[in-house]
């Protein structure tokens, strides 16, 4: 049940030195492929950084957060079309990529892996390291790997604080 994966998802910042089997990684990436996007454009590309030397460089460009290098894979979420504006006046690319990466994070939980969203990175430095074209924008990084520890559940606000019916 998807609600269980949602409840179990944590931001993991401590990973085991363990490779992710291709079959497991394939299931996680299939969840990304099935993610909805504005106009079903799927205007993203994910770079999966597995190489140890590259992960070290990525870690340095990501606020020197050591867990970035420690993860089995660093997922770099890139927007291919940063100019598309939806009828509501919002750019679609951050929403599209957030949905895709959320699908990834939830399937990862189902497969016994952990993730962590990362917004602390130097855009231009990361582009240089990973040879990303100028017109492409990195929206987020996400670590992926086997958790080295089980984290306690975080407190969440009560539902009544977060929603209302019909009117604000």
Image (cartoon, rainbow, N blue to C red):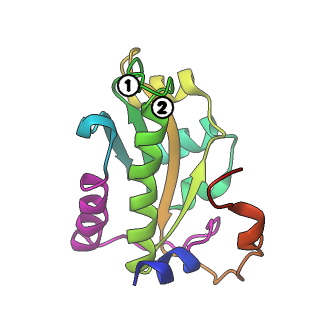
Q: Which residue is depicted at the point 24% across and 40% down?
A: 40
Number of the front mark, 2 or 1: 2
Q: Which residue is depicted at the point 72% across and 62% down?
A: 162
Residue linked to disc 2: 138
Q: Viewed as shown, does residue 146 lie left or right of 100?
A: right
Who comes first in sequence, dot 2 or dot 1? 1
Residue 137 spot, x, y in % from top left = 45, 25
Quarter residue 92 falls in: top left
Q: Viewed as shown, does residue 112 lie left or right of 166?
A: left
The magenta stretch spans which residues?
9-35
Question: Vertically, is 32 above or below 133?
Answer: below
Q: Secondary structure at mark 2?
A: strand
Residue linked to disc 1: 132
Question: Vertically, is 50 above or below 24?
Answer: above
Q: Nearer the viewer, residue 49 or 7?
A: 7
Residue 123 spot, x, y in % from top left = 56, 26
Q: Which residue is depicted at the point 27% across and 35% down?
A: 39
Answer yes or no: do the residues labelled 2 and 1 have beta carbons within 8 Å?
Answer: yes
Based on the picture, tell me whether residue 46 belongs to the magenta stretch.
no
Q: Which residue is depicted at the point 39% across and 15% down?
A: 135
């Amino acid at each position: 049940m998807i609600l269980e994966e949602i409840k179990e998802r944590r931001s993991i910042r401590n990973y085991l030195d363990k490779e992710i089997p291709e079959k497991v990684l394939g299931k996680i990436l299939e969840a990304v492929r099935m993610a909805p996007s504005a106009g079903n454009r799927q205007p993203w590309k994910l770079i999966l950084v597995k190489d140890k030397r590259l992960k070290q460089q990525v870690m340095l460009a990501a606020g020197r957060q050591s867990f970035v290098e420690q993860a089995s894979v660093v997922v770099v979420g890139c927007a291919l079309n940063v100019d598309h504006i939806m009828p509501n006046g919002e750019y679609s690319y951050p929403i599209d990529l957030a949905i895709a990466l959320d699908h990834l994070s939830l399937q990862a939980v189902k497969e016994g892996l952990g993730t962590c969203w990362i917004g602390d990175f130097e855009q231009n430095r990361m582009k240089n390291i990973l040879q990303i074209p100028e017109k492409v924008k990195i929206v987020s990084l996400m670590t992926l790997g086997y958790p080295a520890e089980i984290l306690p559940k975080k407190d969440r606000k009560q539902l009544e604080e977060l929603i209302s019916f019909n009117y604000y």
